[in-house]
Amino acid sequence: MDKYIINGGNYLNGSIKISGAKNAAVAILPAVLLCDETCRIENIPCISDVNLIINILKSIGSSIKVINKNTLEINCKNVGSYTLSSAQTSGMRASSYFIGALLGRFNRARVAPPGGCDFGVRPIDQHIKGFEALGARVIYDNAMVDAKATELVGSSIYLDKVSVGATINIMLAAVKAKGLTIIENAAKEPHVVDLATFLNSMGADIMGAGTNVIKIRGVDYLHSSTYSIIPDQIEAGTYMAAVAAAGGNVVIENVIPKHLESIISKLTEAGVTIEEYEESVRVVSDKKLVATNLLTMPHPGFPTDMQPQMTTLLALADGVSIVNEGVWDNRFRYINQLILMGADITVDGKTAIVKGVKHFNSAPVCATDLRAGAALVIAALATEGVSEISNIHYIERGYEDIIEKLKNVGADIKRIYVPDPNKVDIAL
Ligand code: EPU
């Protein structure tokens, strides 16, 4: 029920340090189940999606030592259960990674289907195709995905659709399977590569991550590792878009510029000045934005997870932009909220026609999912007057310390507590 109150219109100046990548962390933490020794994972973003993964690990017997808010030492030696109920998995998409990780550990996983943001149908048929190719029998039993194998044996798997989740899940199941697994038409996202690098640091034999053919030669044993998660490409892109829309001059620190190439290209086309350094980028904007077209695609294409933020920016640009969503069937639900703020956007299926307006009007708006929420924060920062954003729990699934990071560069933003009318608050 809590809200963000943003008094927009301030230019943003200073620097923002980017946290570890959410979508890498939610894959790497379950991967620790494949090892019986203690792993130390650093640069973990402190966000609610990661907390859900940590709670699942604890609930099945992992011992977790908190070194600091971004570093954990995890030991899974005493994990004895391969079952996860829907209460454990329904809060997020990445809970599906426990199917691959538990199958890899126990040759068995009984896991309720994952939840996650609603972008239309989100099947896991390609994950299951991979598990079956490795020799598992997978059935739906009592609303649980039940995967069972006598032994997992390497195989060739062609993904009918480029899928981050299927690529990661198959890697998790295959890393200790017997023999060679080849994933063709694999996803190439930085978080896929980060998982492979982490697994290799534990003694796995994975080649080709970051290309569309990944080869995994099964190993018997994975050992302990100390590993630091890559910076979050989408968090960085979100703050870059915020500076572009609100105007200002901000250094985005702790990034891998190579991961930001498509975002940098599109922001540059939209009239934003970006300077690249070794581990940072400077974003300079005078708010004079120009229209450009956008098509989201799997990496190295423009990331769908930046589409709402970029569309928000284009809604303030001079001219008409055509935005095509190439990954998800229904990722324009937030547009109605932008229209409440005065945007001129028409959606037709997976295409949005964005006619730039000179400015938005402040308004109370509601986040419909994680990146949609980030887009509304950008809209409010760029708009004179006080906007209120509700449903912020979505935003906090993926952005560590968003209030502090934005305040540090001059934004007027605060989080307010709103009591839930359906709950009695007891003052202690
Ligand atoms: N798909 C299938 N069958 C499958 C799997 C996917 O048809 O078995 C389809 C999907 O319906 C979609 C496309 O393939 O049309 C891509 O889906 P993908 O599997 O790549 O998505 P995901 O693994 O469920 C991850 C990210 C999303 C991000 C997508 C695409 C995580 C935890 N989630 O989802 O991130 O949008 O890849 O890049 O890594 C976010 O961070 O806000 C977010 C939603």
Image (cartoon, helix red, strand yellow):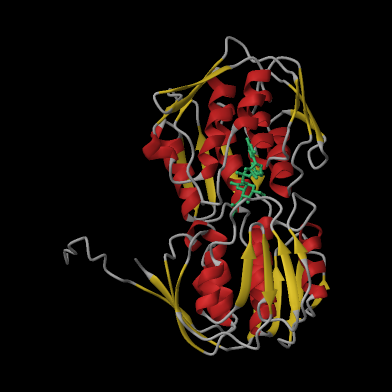
The percent position of residue 79, horizontal first and vertical second, equals 45, 26
Q: Nearer the viewer, residue 213 or 407?
A: 213
The percent position of residue 393, horizontal first and vertical second, equals 43, 61
Quadrant of residue 319 within the rendered picture: bottom right
Image quarter hosting the N terminus: bottom left
Residue 17 visible in the shown view = no
Image quarter hosting the C terminus: bottom left
Residue at horizontal 77%, vertical 50%?
299
The percent position of residue 186, horizontal first and vertical second, equals 76, 37
Q: Is residue 140 left or right of residue 158?
A: left
Residue 271 visible in the shown view = yes
Q: Is residue 305 left or right of residue 380?
A: right
Depicted 405 relative to depicted 294: above or below: below
Query: Regarding ligand 1, which quadrant of the image does it lie in?
Result: top right
Depicted 151 relative to depicted 214: above or below: above
Q: Nearer the viewer, residue 340 or 4?
A: 340
Q: Nearer the viewer, residue 315 or 190?
A: 315
Depicted 173 relative to depicted 281: above or below: above
In this rendering, the count of numbered labels is 0
Q: Is residue 334 left or right of residue 209?
A: left
Quadrant of residue 130 within the rendered picture: top right
